[in-house]
Amino acid sequence: MASTSLTFRCPDEVLAAIDNLGKERYPAANTKHGCDRSKTLIDIMRAGIEALNDGSVVLPAPEEVRQPSDVRQNLSDSVLEARITEIVQRQTEPLRAALKAELKAELLGESAA
């Protein structure tokens, strides 16, 4: 698997939280912060991406900066409606495909008779 270096600014309190989690999951005595930050961050990002994809977490709208605890409480109606529509479509797609196939088979059967 190829790797690319990623550099970004991180608030001190977020970095401290990353290090605390890393010390539990990937302790490393040979680093000044006591953990393998790369492995820790990859785990955090994978979990975050999965949560975003399954709809259990919603990012705030880009034009507004909110605290993580406020995200669900302060979603604008349009953002909330768009997210609900997306989740409903994703969850109902298998049912719609099965229904479409069943109706097509039924209609083709009627036209052959």
Image: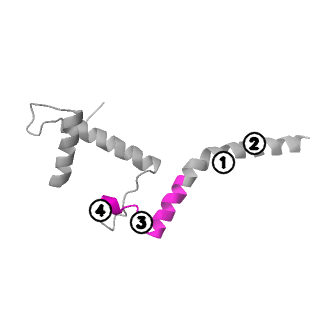
Give the image location of residue 28, x and y in percent: 14, 31
Q: CA distance from mark 4 to mark 3?
A: 12 Å
Q: CA distance from mark 1 to mark 4?
A: 37 Å
Q: CA distance from mark 4 to mark 2?
A: 47 Å
Three-letter amino acid code of the residue under disc 3: Leu
Write down the quadrant of residue 38 in the picture.
Answer: top left
Q: Secondary structure at mark 3?
A: loop
Kindly identify the residue that appears in the image at 46 percent across and 51 percent down: 55
- Evaluate whether residue 20 shows in this view: yes
List the residue tagged with mark 3. Answer: 75
List the residue tagged with mark 1. Answer: 96
Mark 3 is surrounded, within 10 Å at the Cα level, by few (under 14), some (14 to 19) or many (20 or more) other residues, namely some
Give the residues in magenta. Answer: 68-87
The quadrant in which the N terminus is found is top left
Three-letter amino acid code of the residue under disc 2: Glu
Q: Is residue 102 magenta?
A: no
Kindly identify the residue that appears in the image at 29 percent across and 62 percent down: 67
List the residue tagged with mark 4. Answer: 67
Three-letter amino acid code of the residue under disc 1: Arg
Who comes first in sequence, dot 2 or dot 3? 3
Who comes first in sequence, dot 1 or dot 4? 4
Colouring scheme applied when the structure was drawn: one colour
